[in-house]
Amino acid sequence: MIVELLTFRPRPGTTEDELRAAETRVYEDFAMHQHGIIRRTTARSDDGEWLVVQLWYDLACADAAATAAGDHPATAALHALAEPGSLATRRYEDLGG
């Protein structure tokens, strides 16, 4: 299993309602239609950073979704609300246990 973490900070002036609506659209219109997705959840820290955690069956599924995300309007809309340079994605291989 692959654990994928996406972190970002909202652009100044972006409301939480805008971010939640964009995240819901990504979840409903894109993420949950991707082969191999197990779970997706979103969180926000006290200092305003957002975190999206996605669990994938394997690396091939995560890679395919990342490629598809580049052309999807829902992901583009969410990324447009992020402060430039703040988007970061990291992947980890689950060790079990």
Image (spheres, rainbow, N blue to C red):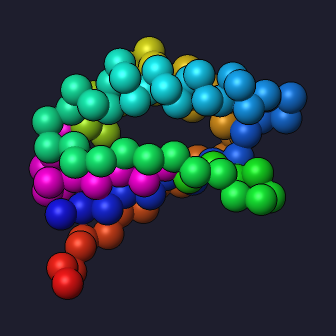
Counting from the top left corner in percent of width and height, residue 93 is at 24, 71
Counting from the top left corner in percent of width and height, residue 17 is at 71, 25
Q: Nearer the viewer, residue 39 or 80?
A: 39
Q: Is residue 30 above or below residue 50?
A: above
State which quarter of the image contains the N terminus: bottom left
Q: Which residues are magenta?
A: 52-64
Q: On the picture, is 79 further left or further right than 66? A: right
Counting from the top left corner in percent of width and height, residue 84 is at 70, 40
One can see residue 54 in this view:
yes
When asked about the image quadrant of residue 28, the answer is top left
One can see residue 62 in this view:
no
Figure label count: 0
Q: Nearer the viewer, residue 83 or 45?
A: 45
Q: Nearer the viewer, residue 25 or 58?
A: 25
56 part of magenta stretch: yes
Toward the right, the furthest residue is 13
State which quarter of the image contains the C terminus: bottom left
Query: At x 23% / y 73%, what residue is drawn?
Result: 94
